[in-house]
């Protein structure tokens, strides 16, 4: 290794002097010459094991790419792969390896330098590419990667920034291959098995990345990272964004399956599914099958092990659906064969139904509140006027329209409640019959229901839809009852109540909860413990494993406990049906909040470990907010550790930043002088799996000489969590205008508040009085203390009684 003379230090390619380069201590200095041949230029990219330089071949006088690796990594992983490919892969679709060597304690790989712009910048400019053109651009890369597979290698590092658009419009792939990668370093092009130390890699791994790139080329939209998709898969079919052939769309969606077994075994199989020419790819298929066939079979075994492990945790439900489809397709089942399969593989069938229900639910944007700005408003109003039986409430100026069941099918919308479980009630009923071993033994004893519309004339003539039906079943020959409540429009289950012995209720809870709320579970021991809690007869125990559901365990009030029924109810924690509590932003929020992880998932475990490792202090506490005492442990973190984790806390909040709010209040001539602030970083780990986080800052502001504002904001993203407006203790100054101005900025409901507040002002001013005002985007709680001082607290609406998001 040597350097050029100072007089020669002008790059023949970049035309830059030494002083013009950005440089770090771990980089080779510009113009350093390796092997007396390759001159170092600018750093183009760096990751955990690699630094990629622009370089120049001084002998052949041409640009090259120079890859530098730590010696240990080079000898352990990279050198063998580079040797196996050197001189073998000469396709136009991938940069050719020209040289490799070890020098000065570092390994180096030299490749040709593809001239052109990256596909990443190309797509930013074009946004998306027509299907036929994308196929033409991609063909050389597909042939090249297929050649890698025939040579026994997986590229594993395909992405937009590693693909170059050449002068002829085709793509060329950079030659730096990768296998495993940490979740922190993974981009959206890495297959799930690359993040798993036990994952089985093969051609299907590159198929995933190629299809993700292909998807982005034709749609202009990115696919989520695999780790994020395993939590909540929001990938939409390409036809949502572009015109595309059905075969191409189906191939791309299959190619980006999270399950390796659901993807194509090889690039040849991928091309075959799209009816594209594959003569060159077919030439190497025999070799590819020989090299990778056994690994392909091992992927099925690996997935089966993972499913068994996750089934114990109640975490298996996401993955089985795809396997079931695969099994059905492989078996070539006819309609009769499918019926037989369902009867003999009911657990897989139920899991598949749940997965399909989740996909349908997550892609829907149903609502039950409509005002004049909504496109559905007129249809809903016409529906209630045509079919409804009108009932007026003169006190509240509320009009209710009751709809007879025979006209429910005419309802213009397909959802009658704001929240419910994923599953429809019929599938839930089948699951209960199967797991509780009461198939063909339950009889419908009673059914009731209602569908109505409530119209508030003063609230912008807003229409509130409510729909519910309840079926009660008796188990023949047993002292057991099942009550299913569901939305008659969407058919989705809202709650299920099982009345039986204490032991049977415990078993019901253990088996049925993972199907209704797949994000959490309770172990057999936990279910037994809950049912054994010593409460007085006639009382009940309430558990909220997350903000999505409540579990209510009722104890018998009869004199003879052993002869009466216990009951366990699993209930979706619904948004209040009134318009005053509807907060659309919360339901559409896709932010990941600290603590909002599926119980038992890797992210869940990682966060718990992080909290325990970095906690400044911890304290055991009991939750007495409800009729229960859930043991939990409260950990205090430092501000720096909370910020290092990097996710906002999971309290409900307004979708406005505090700095923006303060700025706008200043524009309204409020003083907004900050007087103090207090920070809090608390994580509460509850016994049955819930994680509650509070990373917040409470700042006190002087709005006027006599009115003050306390604001609680999120420490990480600065969003407002709650606000409290109060008066100088010695003066009774009207503060409702200040509250109205704040409401104007966060929910645009200032006029409604002033009107309602004015009506109740005399009542509010009485000592120790309290009032609650619900608006579409905010809740205002007013209170007069013993000194006649008025305090008004502004909070976001919440689903049910939950203080925390989880899950959306």
Image (tube, rainbow, N blue to C red):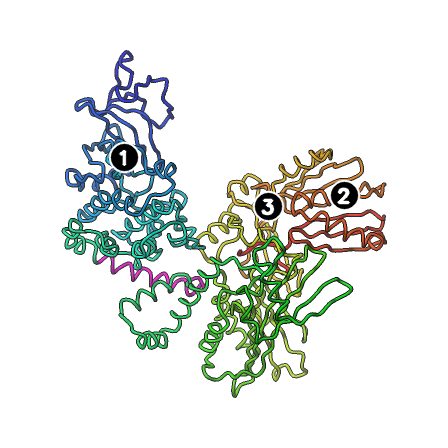
Q: Main secondary structure of the magenta part?
A: helix
Query: At 67% from the left edge and 62% from the top edge, which residue is drawn?
Result: 455
- Residue 71 image label: 1
Instruction: Indicate which label's residue lies in the foreground, 2 or 3.
Output: 2
Residue at label 2?
737
Vertical order, 655 against 114 (above or below) = below
Residue 310, percent from left and from top: 41, 62
**For the magenta stretch, what is the residue range?**
294-315
Asked if 137 appears above or below 61 in the picture, the reply is below
* Residue that mark 3 sits on: 655
* 65 up-or-down from 780: above or below: above
Residue at image point 27% right, 22% down:
13
| Magenta highlight on residue 327 | no
Q: Does any portion of residue 198 appear in the rendered image?
A: no
Tell me if mark 3 has few (under 14), some (14-19) or many (20+) residues whose alpha carbon lies within 10 angstroms of its own: some
> Looking at the picture, how far across and down is residue 728, in whole percent?
81, 40
Q: Earlier in the sequence, mark 2 or mark 1?
A: 1
Q: Do tag 1 and tag 3 residues touch (Cβ < 8 Å)?
A: no
Which quadrant of the view contains residue 677? top right
Is residue 426 or residue 650 the one in the foreground? 426
Q: Quadrant of the N terminus?
A: top left
**Camera sees residue 646:** yes
* The label number, if any, that marks residue 640 in the structure image: none
């Amino acid at each position: 290794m040597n350097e050029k003379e100072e007089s020669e230090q002008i790059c023949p390619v970049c035309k830059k002097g030494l002083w013009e380069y950005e440089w770090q201590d771990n980089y080779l200095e510009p113009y350093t010459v390796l092997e007396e041949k390759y001159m170092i230029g600018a750093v183009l990219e760096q990751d955990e094991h690699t630094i990629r330089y622009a370089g120049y071949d001084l002998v052949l006088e041409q640009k090259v790419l120079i890859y530098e690796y730590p010696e240990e990594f080079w000898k352990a992983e990279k050198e063998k792969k580079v040797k196996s490919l050197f001189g073998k892969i000469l396709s136009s679709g991938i940069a050719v390896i020209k040289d490799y060597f070890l020098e000065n304690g570092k390994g180096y790989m030299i490749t040709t330098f593809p001239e052109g712009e990256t596909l990443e910048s190309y797509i930013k400019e074009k946004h998306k590419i027509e299907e036929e053109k994308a196929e033409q651009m991609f063909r050389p890369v597909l042939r090249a990667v297929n050649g890698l597979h025939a040579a026994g290698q997986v590229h594993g590092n395909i992405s937009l920034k590693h693909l170059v658009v050449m002068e002829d419009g085709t793509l060329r792939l950079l030659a730096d291959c990768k296998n495993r990668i940490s979740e922190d370093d993974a981009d959206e092009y890495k297959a799930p098995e690359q993040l798993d130390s036990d994952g089985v890699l093969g051609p299907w791994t590159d198929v995933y990345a190629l299809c993700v790139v292909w998807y982005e080329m034709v749609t202009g939209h990115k696919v989520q990272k695999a780790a994020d998709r395993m939590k909540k898969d929001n990938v939409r079919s390409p036809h949502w964004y572009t015109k595309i052939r059905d075969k191409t769309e189906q191939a791309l969606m299959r190619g980006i399956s999270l399950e390796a077994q659901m993807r194509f075994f090889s690039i040849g199989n991928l091309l075959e599914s799209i009816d594209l020419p594959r003569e060159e790819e077919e030439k190497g298929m025999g070799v590819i099958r020989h090299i990778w066939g056994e690994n392909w079979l091992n992927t099925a075994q690996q997935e089966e092990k993972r499913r068994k492990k996750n089934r114990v945790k109640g975490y298996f439900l996401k993955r089985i659906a795809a396997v079931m489809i695969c099994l059905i397709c492989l078996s070539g089942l006819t309609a009769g064969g499918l019926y037989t399969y369902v009867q003999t593989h009911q657990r897989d069938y139920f899991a598949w139904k749940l997965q399909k229900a989740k996909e349908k639910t997550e892609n829907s944007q149903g609502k039950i509140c409509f005002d004049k700005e909504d496109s559905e408003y007129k249809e809903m109003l016409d529906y209630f006027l045509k079919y409804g039986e009108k009932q007026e409430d003169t006190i509240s100026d509320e009009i209710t329209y009751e709809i007879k069941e025979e006209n429910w099918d005419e309802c213009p919308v397909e959802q009658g409640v704001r929240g419910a479980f994923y599953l429809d009630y019929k599938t839930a009923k089948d699951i209960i019959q199967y797991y509780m071993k009461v198939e063909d033994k339950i009889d419908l004893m009673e059914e009731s229901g209602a569908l109505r519309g409530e119209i508030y004339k003063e609230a912008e003539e807003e229409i509130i839809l409510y729909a519910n039906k309840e079926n009660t079943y008796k188990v023949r020959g047993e002292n057991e009852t099942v009550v299913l409540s569901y939305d008659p429009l969407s058919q989705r289950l809202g709650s299920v109540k099982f009345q039986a012995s204490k032991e049977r209720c415990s078993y019901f809870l253990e088996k049925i909860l993972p199907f209704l709320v797949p994000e959490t579970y309770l172990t057999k021991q936990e279910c037994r413990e809950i049912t054994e809690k010593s409460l007085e007869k006639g009382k009940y125990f309430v558990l909220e494993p997350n903000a999505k559901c409540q579990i209510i365990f009722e104890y018998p009030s009869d004199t003879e406990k052993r002869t009466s029924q216990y009951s366990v109810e699993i209930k979706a924690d619904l948004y209040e049906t009134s318009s005053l509590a509807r907060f659309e932003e919360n339901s559409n929020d896709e932010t990941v909040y600290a603590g909002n992880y599926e119980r038992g998932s890797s992210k869940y475990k990682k966060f718990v470990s992080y909290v325990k490792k970095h906690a400044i202090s911890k304290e055991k506490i009991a939750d007495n907010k409800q009729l229960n005492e859930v043991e939990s442990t409260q950990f205090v973190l430092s501000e720096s550790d909370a910020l290092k984790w990097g996710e906002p806390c999971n309290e409900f909040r307004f979708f406005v930043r505090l700095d923006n709010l303060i700025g706008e209040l200043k524009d309204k001539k409020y003083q907004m002088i900050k007087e103090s602030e207090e920070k809090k970083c608390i994580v509460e780990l509850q016994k049955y799996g819930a994680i509650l986080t509070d990373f917040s800052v409470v700042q006190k502001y002087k709005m006027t000489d006599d009115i003050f504002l306390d604001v609680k904001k999120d420490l990480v993203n600065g969003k407002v969590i709650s606000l409290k407006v109060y008066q100088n203790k010695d003066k009774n100054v009207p503060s409702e205008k200040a509250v109205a101005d704040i409401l104007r900025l966060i929910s645009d409901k200032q006029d409604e508040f002033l009107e309602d507040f004015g009506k109740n002002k005399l009542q509010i001013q009485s000592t120790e009085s309290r009032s609650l005002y619900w608006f579409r985007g905010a809740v205002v709680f007013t209170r007069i203390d013993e000194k006649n001082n008025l305090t008004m607290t502004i909070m976001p609406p919440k689903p049910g009684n939950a203080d925390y998001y989880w899950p959306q």
